[in-house]
Image (spheres, helix red, strand yellow):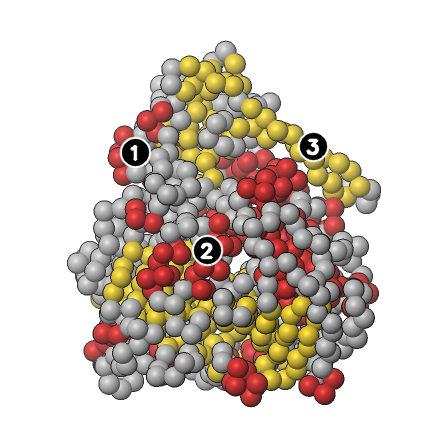
Amino acid sequence: MNAFIRTRKYFPLAALVTLALAACSDSNDSKQAPEASGYSADIVWTQYGIPHVTAQDYGSAGYGVGYAYARENYCTIMREYVRAAGESARYLGEDGDLNADLVMKLYNSDARVERMIAEDIPGYIVENLTGYAAGLNRYLAETGVDNLAEGDEGCRGAPWVRDVDLRDVVRMVHKAVLVGSAGPLTDYIVAAEPSADMARVTAPEGVAPAALMLAGLSQAQFDANLPLPKGGALGSNAYAIGADASQTNSGILFGNPHFPWAGPQRFFMFHLTLGDEYDVMGAALGGLPAPVIAFNRDLAWSHTVSTASRFNFYELTLNPENRMQYLYDGQYRDITSETVSAQRLDESGELETVEHTFYFSHYGAIVNLGGINSLLDGWPTINGSVLSYFDANLENLRGLNQWINMGKSRNLGEFKNALRDMGIPWVNTIAADRYGDAFYGDISVTPHVTSVQYKNCVRGPLQTAVTGFGYPTLDGSDPECELGSDEGTAAKIFGYDSLPKLETREYGANANDSYWLSNPRHLLEGYSPIIGKERVEQSRRTRATFSQAEKRLAGTDGLGAPGFSINTIRQLHYSADNHAAALVLDAVLEVCQDWPEDALAGISQELIACEILANWDRTHRIDSVGGHVFYEFWRVMRSTPNMWVTPFDPADPVNTPRDLNLDDPSVVTAVQNALTAAVVALNTAGIPLDRPWGEVQFVEKNGERIPIHGGSGDMMFSVITSNLVEGEGYSSIRHGNSYIQAITWDESDCPDAYAILTYSQSTDPASEHYADATKLYSSGGWIDMPFCEADRDAQEIGRVTITD
């Protein structure tokens, strides 16, 4: 490696380091990992620590991006490489997870990774990923393990810090792809052992196992014990605005993923250019070498987490004489196995090796869902069966090539063609271009379970119950229940033409409900239930998303003339309106006014809460007073039965259900009880009822409290998820608004682009970019994204050329 002096500051122009360029192969077809040499990348940093990486080949592009990312987040990504290699229990102490390690040893084994590299990843992507690893290693060599970041995500002096290679990068990407399948199923895959007892539950005399199964399982058990990205730790909002809904003739794209504020699922902003071939700016999750939510000169896109399932179960009827066999097409097949090993520290601190055997049908791994309900425990269960699962994203790294091709697209026609690769693992895609076209589609990897199979292959109590809870479960004994395939698409998943999509000149949007409501005037129907539900009540955040869009189209929101502009779409985000309050607060205040006089003496605090809510502006901006009172009220109130006068109407999903049902005395009592509960919760936590939201919800960085606007996704469009901490407030922010971008185009060649990264670029407390963007977000500001070279140079804060 060439000599290179590292400083914490960016390199000023006067100290520009220019190193000799070495010859690079221009072949994109080689499947061999290139040697870590011949890389050259120019990096220019602009305000808020955004690197602009320019290279002439994909290996060098990866090298520059890896290096730039490592300067701000090396420890975060290194920790994830440890997990992806199945070494967390050995190295990460209480943060280690032996079960997750064992599953990673299975699905990220050396043989599987080598097969993915040889068979599934194009040569130029291999070069790109190899360069990325080399960029990380360069940063480590310059810095030294004893000088790495400190803090909550630091790793200074950690024994698990090491050089990484192509295989590490592939393992980490594969782990990220499996976040909607093997991730939530990890414990249940490990729990499947034929040495387990027979069914842990015995049906009482005279009670059929089927009746016990149907009566004993519940939706709540599955929701609590089998969390998935949909509705869980990941979410998003996005709009694609076409020319007919725009105040100009160009499209507008707004994207706002709701992702964790710590760990590898934090976004990182950067701009990547390879001559005339590729020029894209945006953000990616840690470890990805190209932007995945982004824009170029002519087009922009975002993603939202999809409702589609990434796996399906099969119920296997076991041979009564040999529980290592299952019935298929009238004959018994053998269950196969594979043994892996992982290491952990025992109670004395000594290293020990743990072996575990996994079991498989021809569909995939056997699982034991006893952790959800004991009725599903055992080998076999009370139903005489076990469950196996098919993982549609296993060994799916097609997205790496697909995102590059999406970034090369010059219009929505080319962009939609890039989506046909079917590699995007678990998100919807929303896009718009400068020509006024807009697009929404759930074009994501989904098992090919047809509507006919839903009707004919879900049989018996176990399959019916588990499918009804949102986890498709088919009869594993019938070949007719095997997954199909679409022409030109990877086996056993739906192809582009079979998936829901909206092409429009008006607008499309998504906020993590299904594809069904992507535009109120163009409901999408007739798709397989494995993709999502149709004609069902939408979440309040989805309703807020479309309600504010419809008001903007009509010009009734107080933001001026009808239609969207780059300014109004940004104002909608920072308005931080509480949609739940818009639905119920007027009626709640009626209850306050009519509180029985004989109860007034004991509810002085409740009446103060009522007065605060009456004066509240119904937003969660940092200067608003009353948002925390409503939030604690709503946490209790939202599940009240018979709450609405006007029920859900599939013909009007944006505006129904509505009207708090004060004619029902139990609803009135629920309002009163919820107000009391809110007062008690805040008093117990020591939080004054009249405190401004920015003093209640904040993030602390280097000892400074930074107010954060936004609130619970159950109430509103602008999402921040945080826990109430005694004596502080909602200071434990774990999830929510992250990389937010708003993009349009005018007559110039440069996109009119704005963005913000709520938690800032860096996880290193010593970095200049640990809190700078967070403060900008707190003040309601935006980064004017410098896509074109002149704009980049005007914002420049440093640059360097790195070679190897």
Crowding near the residue tagged with mark 2, few <14, some 14–19, many ≥20 C-alpha atoms within 10 Å: many
Determine which of the numbered discs, if any, sits on residue 453 in the image. 1
Q: Nearer the viewer, residue 143 or 758?
A: 143
What is the quadrant of residue 714 in the picture?
A: bottom left
Coordinates of residue 725 in the picture (x, y in percent) = 57, 68
Q: Earlier in the sequence, mark 1 or mark 2?
A: 2
SS class of the residue under badge 2? helix
- Give, as a three-letter code, the residue at label 1: Gln
Crowding near the residue tagged with mark 1, few <14, some 14–19, many ≥20 C-alpha atoms within 10 Å: some
Mark pair 2, 3: CA separation? 37 Å
Residue bearing the label numbered 3: 355
Q: Nearer the viewer, residue 275 or 210?
A: 275
Placement of the C terminus among the 4 image quadrants? bottom right
Q: Nearer the viewer, mark 1 or mark 2?
A: 2
**Residue found at x 65% / y 30%:** 339
SS class of the residue under badge 3? strand
- Give, as a three-letter code, the residue at label 2: Gln
Q: Does residue 400 appear in this view?
A: yes
Q: Does residue 546 appear in this view?
A: no
Q: Earlier in the sequence, mark 2 or mark 3?
A: 3
SS class of the residue under badge 1? helix
Direction from residue 125 to residue 210 in the image, left or right: left
Placement of the N terminus among the 4 image quadrants? bottom right
Residue bearing the label numbered 2: 402
